[in-house]
Image (tube, helix red, strand yellow):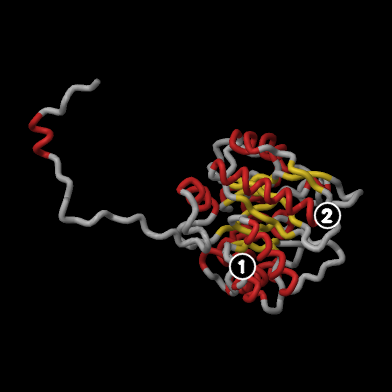
Amino acid sequence: MPGAEPKQEQEQKDFAVATPFQQVPGFALKGCEGLDWGMKSRMSRIFNPKSGRTVMLAFDHGYIYGPTTGLERMDLTIPPLVPHVDCLMCTRGALRTCILPDCGKPVCLRSSSGSSILKDMSYELISVDIEDAIRLGASAITCQVYVGGEHEYETLRNLSYLINQGMKYGIPTLGVTAIGREMVRDSRYLGLATRLIAEVGAQFVKTYYCEKDFDEVVAGCPIPIVIAGGKKLPELDALKMAYNAISQGAMGVDMGRNVFCADDPIAMVQAVKAVVHNDEKPEKAFDLYQTLKNENKGKAKCKKG
């Protein structure tokens, strides 16, 4: 047992009894006020506390598509982009082999796998247990949900399992709306899918942007929405999509091909960041992209010279 405090030190204490207890201020991220401290802490790593938004870098394509264009050499493509993003979304294989442990970025860990592009991609299972996610220091776990697909039930079961496991250990779950070829990417479908994922209990959701009534999709979803980049677009079009989504209430983007397949991926990710965190207009962000791209070309020439 430690000894009693000296009388002099006891007399010097000040409990500020006239000052009311300082309540912890409310957590600003949509729908997250009631989460436990650990869950909030991890969410605040993913979402920038100043802007309340996130730029996630998705490079988990290989678990379905193999060596995707732009990701033939993840060890060369991804590390230069890491300093410019808020969160990495990847598989455990990519994380362990291509990302330095001291990179300082939170990880949203792809926790499902199943069939490749050669088969029915909607048939998935949970392939990463919660212990391995914890071992890897994941800030979030994720799987796809095929609402309206043949295997809707199985993918919802996967999501529910991840959510239940994550709740035990304070790890948020990202629900991803995976859209099959037969599904229309309109506000009615996206509104159904995102609301369903939120009601099952996910802490945030990734979905696609739609031109019409996307603000209604966001309004009907009680948790943060981040948009998928989807197929490769011209750089200005990708920036416009990000700007429109953010303007209508999305809390971030999770882009892959529109970053690592750009003419200059490092310049592109910085332009996306300007849109998401600084509300930069797409045209000005594209000017930034062009400027950075030219600077990077100049640096490359100097190195060769």
Residue nearest the viewer, comparing 88 with 222: 222
- Judge whether 70 appears above or below 103 on screen: below
Q: Quadrant of the N terminus?
A: top left
- Residue 298 visible in the picture: no
Q: How many marks?
A: 2
Residue 115 is labelled as none
Q: Residue furthest bottom?
A: 212
Q: CA distance from mark 1 to mark 2?
A: 23 Å
Type of amino acid under label 1: Cys
The amino acid on which the numbered mark 2 sits, given as a three-letter code, is His
Which mark, by number, is residue 221? 1
Counting from the top left corner in percent of width and height, residue 258 is at: 72, 60
Question: Can residue 153 be seen by looking at this rendering?
Answer: yes
- In the picture, residue 102 is in which quadrant? top right
In this image, 273 relative to 178: left or right?
Answer: left
User: Whole-percent x and y of residue 15?
Assistant: 17, 46
Q: Residue at x 71, y 55 (%)?
A: 256
SS assignment at label 2: loop
Characterize the local packing of mark 1: few (<14), some (14-19) or many (20 or more) Cα atoms within 10 angstroms: many
- Mark 2 highlights which residue? 151
- Whichever of labels 1 and 2 marks the residue nearer the N terminus, that label is 2
Estimate the x, y position of residue 148 in percent, counting from the top left.
81, 63
Of residues 43 and 4, the one drawn nearer to the viewer in this rendering: 4
Residue toward you, 251 or 16: 16
Q: Give the left or right position of residue 105, taking residue 7 as reference.
A: right
**Image point (53%, 56%), residue name:** 47
Q: Label 2: how many residues lie within 10 Å, few (<14), some (14-19) or many (20+)?
A: some
Q: For residue 95, which quarter of the picture?
A: top right
- The quadrant in which residue 105 appears is top right
Q: Secondary structure at mark 1?
A: loop
